Amino acid sequence: MPDIATLAIFAAACLALTATPGPDMLLIASRSLSQGLFTNLLNPKMALFVLALFPQFVRPDAGSVAAQILVLATVLNLIGIVVNGLVIVTASRLARAFSARTRFRRAPQILLGCVFAGLAARLAFDARR
């Protein structure tokens, strides 16, 4: 079982990773639930995090490796639920505030489209280098 200090450091790393904005957070914020869920399940930064950082926090001399991985995965999932839940609640409150104004009704979709267009342009120009 990981000790408290190890869990605290791991939780801080999980929080930093989960709170980093990205396309998955935009999809979650935009209440496109199936797309957000699909993007999070296939999120490469989480896969890399698990592959790169989990082994650094698992110590074979500290007990069952499977139990340690289960505890770390639980911490990661709980932090993800809290951060994504806060994003969802904040986005839904903002959407309700803006929905009263007909002028801003399409603002979230336009913002999401602009962000994705910017990411696509960045990829296109970086690929040319």
Image (cartoon, grey):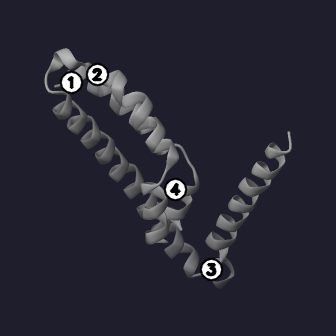
The residue positioned 41% from the left and 34% from the top of the image is: 51
Q: Quadrant of the C terminus?
A: top right
**Which amino acid is tagged 2?**
Thr
Please state which of the two labelled residues, at mark 4 or mark 1, is closer to the viewer. Answer: 1
Quick check: 76 left or right of 66? right
Q: Compared with residue 44, is residue 2 higher up or lower down, i.e. above or below?
A: above
Q: Is residue 55 visible?
A: yes
At label 2, counting other C-alpha atoms closer than 10 Å, the crowd grade (few under 14, some 14-19, many 20 or more) is some
**Residue that label 2 marks:** 6
Residue 107: quarter of image: bottom right
Whichever of labels 3 and 4 marks the residue nearer the N terminus, that label is: 4
Pointer 3 residue: 105
Q: Position of residue 90 (x, y in %)?
A: 46, 61
**Which residue is rendered at x = 47% and y = 38% of the image?**
48
Q: Earlier in the sequence, mark 4 or mark 2?
A: 2
Q: Is residue 77 above or below residue 49?
A: below
Task: Tell me, yes or no, whether the two marked residues, 2 and 1, touch with CB atoms within 8 Å.
Answer: yes
| Contact between labelled residues 1 and 4, with CB atoms less than 8 Å apart | no
Q: Position of residue 47 (x, y in %)?
A: 44, 43
Residue lying at the far bottom in this picture: please name it.
102
Kindly identify the amino acid type of the residue bearing the numbered disc 4. Answer: Met
Of label 4 and label 1, which has the lower sequence position?
A: 1
Q: Is residue 21 above or below residue 7?
A: below
Q: Which residue bears the numbered disc 1?
A: 2
Q: Which residue is mark 4?
A: 25
Q: Amino acid at mark 3?
A: Arg
Considering the numbered disc 1 on the image, is that residue within a helix, a strand or a loop? Answer: loop
Mark 3 vs mark 4, CA separation in Å: 20 Å
Q: Which residue type does callout 1 highlight?
A: Pro
Q: Please identify the quarter of the rendering in which residue 40 is found.
A: bottom left
